[in-house]
């Protein structure tokens, strides 16, 4: 009887363990989806102003930890894709992420994301913290 109890206890223990305990599953991550740059707030040397054309710039976070992004910029009076990329992104835990921001001079950044429901989030890049920089993204 004791052996049967140990067998059932062991089975229960094994089946209760989840295979996503290491944070490697992004299937329900809030950041998934297509996010557009709404504004960049900074007081340092970065000095990026976001215009109507730039607001078409986006990052599309996929569940396979890939992200498509495009930077829109005005050239000759027209708004066109200036740069597009497919990069990796990662969840660092505790609302912290690392991804490539499609604006020139920013690049890959790790930082903290504060979500405002499911429609927007503000990203605070670690390396630009001394410049009081944050980037607001919106789902449209």
Image (tube, grey):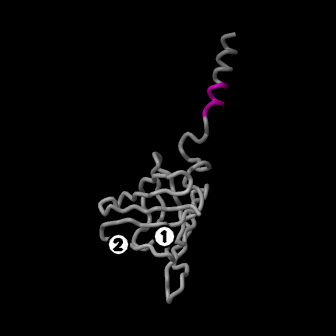
In the image: residue 79, left or right of residue 113:
right
- Secondary structure under the numbered disc 2 in the rendered image: loop
Callout 1 environment at 10 Å: few (<14), some (14 to 19), or many (20+)?
A: many
In front: label 1 or label 2: 2
Q: Does residue 114 lie above or below 82 as drawn?
A: above
Q: Disc 1 designates what residue?
A: 102
Tell me the residue at 61%/33% (across/down): 17
The quarter of the image holding the N terminus is top right
Residue 42, horizontal then vertical, whole percent? 35, 66
**Left or right: 18 with respect to 137?**
right
As helix, strand or loop, the secondary structure at mark 1 comes to: loop
Residue 70 vs 135, above or below: the answer is below
- Residue 47 is tagged as 2
Q: Position of residue 41 (x, y in %)?
A: 38, 65
Decide if residue 41 is on the left or right side of residue 76: left
Q: Image quarter for residue 107?
A: bottom left
Give the mark nearer the N terminus: 1 vs 2.
2
- Screen quadrant of the C terminus: bottom right
Magenta range is 11-17
Label 1, label 2: how far apart the Cα atoms are: 15 Å
> What is the crowding at mark 2: few (fewer than 14 residues within 10 Å), some, or many (at least 20)?
few
Q: Which mark is residue 125?
A: none
Q: Measuring from the top left, give residue 90's x and y in whole percent.
A: 51, 55
Residue 87's spot in the image, x, y percent?
53, 65
Q: Which residue is at the front of the view, 4 or 39?
A: 39
């Amino acid at each position: 009887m004791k052996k049967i109890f140990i067998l059932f206890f062991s089975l229960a223990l094994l089946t209760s363990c989840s295979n996503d305990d290491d944070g490697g599953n992004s299937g329900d991550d809030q950041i998934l989806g297509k996010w557009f740059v709404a504004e960049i707030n900074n007081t340092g040397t970065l000095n990026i102003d976001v215009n109507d054309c730039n607001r078409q710039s986006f990052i599309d976070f996929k569940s396979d930890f890939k992200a498509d992004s495009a930077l829109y910029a005005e050239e000759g009076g027209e708004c066109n894709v200036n740069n597009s990329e497919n990069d990796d992104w990662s969840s660092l835990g505790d609302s912290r992420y690392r991804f490539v921001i499609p604006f020139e001079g920013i690049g890959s950044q790790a930082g903290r994301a504060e979500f405002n429901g499911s429609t927007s989030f503000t990203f605070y890049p670690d390396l630009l913290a001394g410049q009081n920089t944050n980037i607001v993204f919106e789902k449209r």
